[in-house]
Amino acid sequence: MRKMKESRKTRYTRMVLQDSLLELMKNKPISKITIKELCEKADINRTTFYAHYRDQYDLLRTIEGETLSWAKEVITDLIGKRDKKDEMLKVLEEIFQYFNGNKKHLQILMSEQGDINFQKQLLTLIYQEMGVSSSYAPYSVLNAKEDYLIFIVNGSIGLIQNWLKNGMNRSAKDMAETIYTLTCQIK
């Protein structure tokens, strides 16, 4: 089946719904957000909502999927440099710049209100695409290698949440260097 191009109206409707959901998630978890409330916030009717999404979770998964696709695309484009340190720092800095440019959405997606599984999936994708994986850890015990990746992913989530919560008070470059340095020290 051939996918048709989205009309401007469809793109606008989806954008308004995404923005409205994330705005509502600032104050309450997604499980407490109703379709009625979401439609009122977006100023659309329920029929229009259901023409695009099954429920608020489907809408959130769409937002998360778009973010994951972006991350994979950017990392793939940036990988391939000769110097691993410069390559990793550049990828991390680009990711933090994206966070800064899309802070309205990412402050919610990466906050305590967001889905922790999405956060882990995003950072695991980032680290694996950059070549940091459980096999990267120099431990001889099998479980310790997996623990390495779990630790750096969860530690990074905490740092990012703190950065977002504090109004992104550090530059993208500074955050990239901090995470890179801490990750390297763990090895």
Image (cartoon, rainbow, N blue to C red):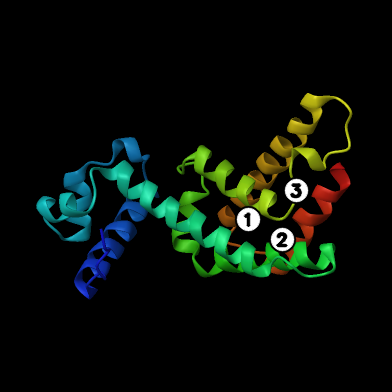
The span from disc 3 to disc 2 (Cα, nearest Å) is: 17 Å
Q: Secondary structure at mark 1?
A: helix
Apparent side of residue 70 relative to residue 148 in the rendered image (left or right):
left
The residue most toward the front is: 1
Near-viewer residue (146 or 59): 146
Residue type indicated by callout 2: Met
User: Relative to 66, does residue 12 appear above or below in the rendering?
Assistant: below
Please give the residue where the numbered disc 2 appears in the rendered image: 175
Please give the residue where the numbered disc 1 appears in the rendered image: 163
Residue 144 coordinates in the image, percent (x, y)? 80, 28
Residue in view at x 75 percent, y 38 percent = 134
Residue 132 numbered mark, or none = 3
Near-viewer residue (76 or 99): 76
| Few, some or many residues within 10 Å of mark 2 (<14, 14–19, 20+) | many
Label located before the other in sequence (3 or 1): 3
**Circle nearer the viewer, 2 or 1:** 2
Residue type indicated by callout 1: Trp
The span from disc 2 to disc 1 (Cα, nearest Å) is: 8 Å
Residue 183 visible? The answer is yes
Residue in view at x 70 percent, y 65 percent = 79
**Circle nearer the viewer, 3 or 2:** 3
Within the image, what quadrant is residue 177 found in?
bottom right
**Circle nearer the viewer, 3 or 1:** 3
Residue 25 visible? The answer is no
